[in-house]
Image (cartoon, grey):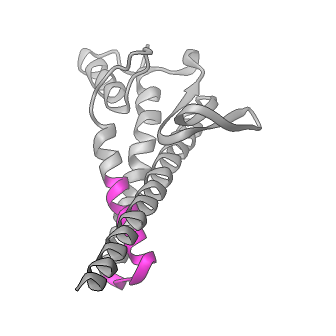
Amino acid sequence: MKQSFAIWELIVRGLEASLTVRGMLAIFTGVVLHELGHILFGRLVRIPITGVVIGEGRRLCGWRMGAITFTIHAIPTSGYVEHAEYHATPLRSAVVAAGGIVVNVAVGIACLAFCLAAEPVGWVGKMLWAIALTHLALAAMSLAPRQYKDGNKSDGLLLLEAWRGFERGNGSTR
């Protein structure tokens, strides 16, 4: 009886470790693709993106690719893009803000559809489920309008401000 308890304990520890690794990978891919969505949509509306920061805490590495500086920090649970404010009308800012959300929804739905249609098994199947749910959750959380302590605004707040600008009739001119 004591030996079977030890086996179950090992199984539970393995599941916890697997969930932790899978969860962190899913969050990291969600944040990276979200920020790449901002870059893509920024290019569509011709807003120059100057920097991409992934994570919080201590800076681990950084590099420059063209005009964009990329930085990775120790805790990869958030991110943001830096862009030239003087190019950003409320409409253009809203398009850039929507870019991350659109990419997260697209990746989440694609992974979810693949999981439901192909029924992948094993670690890959569980990873795809984690990616799907993480991307959809990140898209939903990004819609929450909030202002951060450092003055930055969430995607949801940028979209809300653009919407209010259109209601007032000055969304695309300022």
Name which residue lies at 59% across and 31% down.
58
Quadrant including the N terminus? bottom left
The location of residue 60, given as percent across then percent down, is: 66, 38
Q: Is residue 164 above or below residue 42?
A: above
The location of residue 55, given as percent across then percent down, is: 52, 37
Closer to the camera in the image, 110 or 61 = 61
| Count of numbered circles on the image | 0
Q: Is residue 2 above or below residue 79?
A: below
Residue 147 lies in what quarter of the image? top left
The location of residue 47, given as percent across then percent down, is: 58, 29
Name which residue lies at 31% across and 18% down.
165
Q: Residue furthest front?
A: 2
Q: Main secondary structure of the magenta part?
A: helix
Residue 74 lies in what quarter of the image? top right
Quadrant including the C terminus? top left
Name which residue lies at 37% across and 28% down.
154
Closer to the camera in the image, 93 or 10 = 10
Q: Which residues are magenta?
A: 117-136
> Left of 168 or right of it: where is 25?
right
Say whether residue 111 is magenta: no
The location of residue 46, given as percent across then percent down, is: 59, 32
Say whether residue 127 is magenta: yes
Name which residue lies at 60% across and 35% down.
52
